[in-house]
Amino acid sequence: MRELQLHLRSRRVPLALATVTTSIALAWALSLAFTDSATINARTASLAIMLAVVAVGTTLSGADGALDHTMAVNWPVRRVGHLLLAAATITALLSLSMITDTRYEPFALVLRNTAGLLGLTALGATVLGAALSWIAPLTWTLIAVLPMMGSSRDLRMQVAGWLVQPAGTAAATTCAAILAATGLLAYALRGCPVRPVSETAPDR
């Protein structure tokens, strides 16, 4: 238990969890206050999920990058567990809205967007590092929520705007699944790139 607590604190998980909860609650509160719909629209839900996974991205590496690659720890299993736990936490927090009059739904869309954006964040962390893992999910989400990116029968639009496509859209679901699987596999096997100590050491 002590080891788990140290692991979570070293990756700033408590702060990330607070940010995730705040982002989801704020989007819910704004929808409750300014709309009459019982369903939070896909654009608002996507923005809330994006902010949540960006917060999770900061936890994908510790202060010592070299330690995250030591052979003394089964890092692939730990990394997979970390991502799965993050996905479960975000999904659970979104699902809490089901007991209120304004909901994140349908659940299939919530699950699809969470999995896809979290996979994209993990992929960004693998390539650029945890500190820059926010670039890919933020960029794609901002493109997807543009007014012209609504429901479409065009395959290219369905892929580019997969976040706002209706639940059950095959192209959007496939895109999210590929992002989720690729990000999970890449992060599990490689983790974040090891940075020189001079880049990660705190300023004195």
Image (spheres, grey):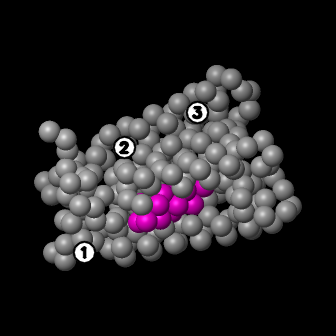
- The spot of residue 59 in percent (x, y) is 34, 52
In this view, 200 is above or below 30: below
Q: CA distance from mark 1 to mark 2?
A: 24 Å
Tell me the quadrant of the picture where the C terminus can be found: top left
- The spot of residue 20 in percent (x, y) is 44, 41
Residue at 62%, 53% in the rendered image: 140
- Numbered mark located on residue 16 in the image: 2
- The spot of residue 142 in percent (x, y) is 64, 45
Dominant secondary structure (helix, strand or loop) of the stretch shown in magenta? helix
Which is nearer the eye, 25 or 61?
Answer: 61
Q: Amino acid at mark 1?
A: Asn
Residue topped by disc 1: 74
Q: Amino acid at mark 2?
A: Ala
Residue at 16%, 75% in the rendered image: 72
Closer to the chain start, of discs 1 and 3, is 3
Secondary-structure class at tag 2:
helix
Residue 169 occupies quadrant: bottom right
Closer to the chain start, of discs 2 and 3, is 2
Left or right for 195, reference 41: left
- Numbered mark located on residue 31 in the image: none
Segment tinted magenta in the rendering: 113-127
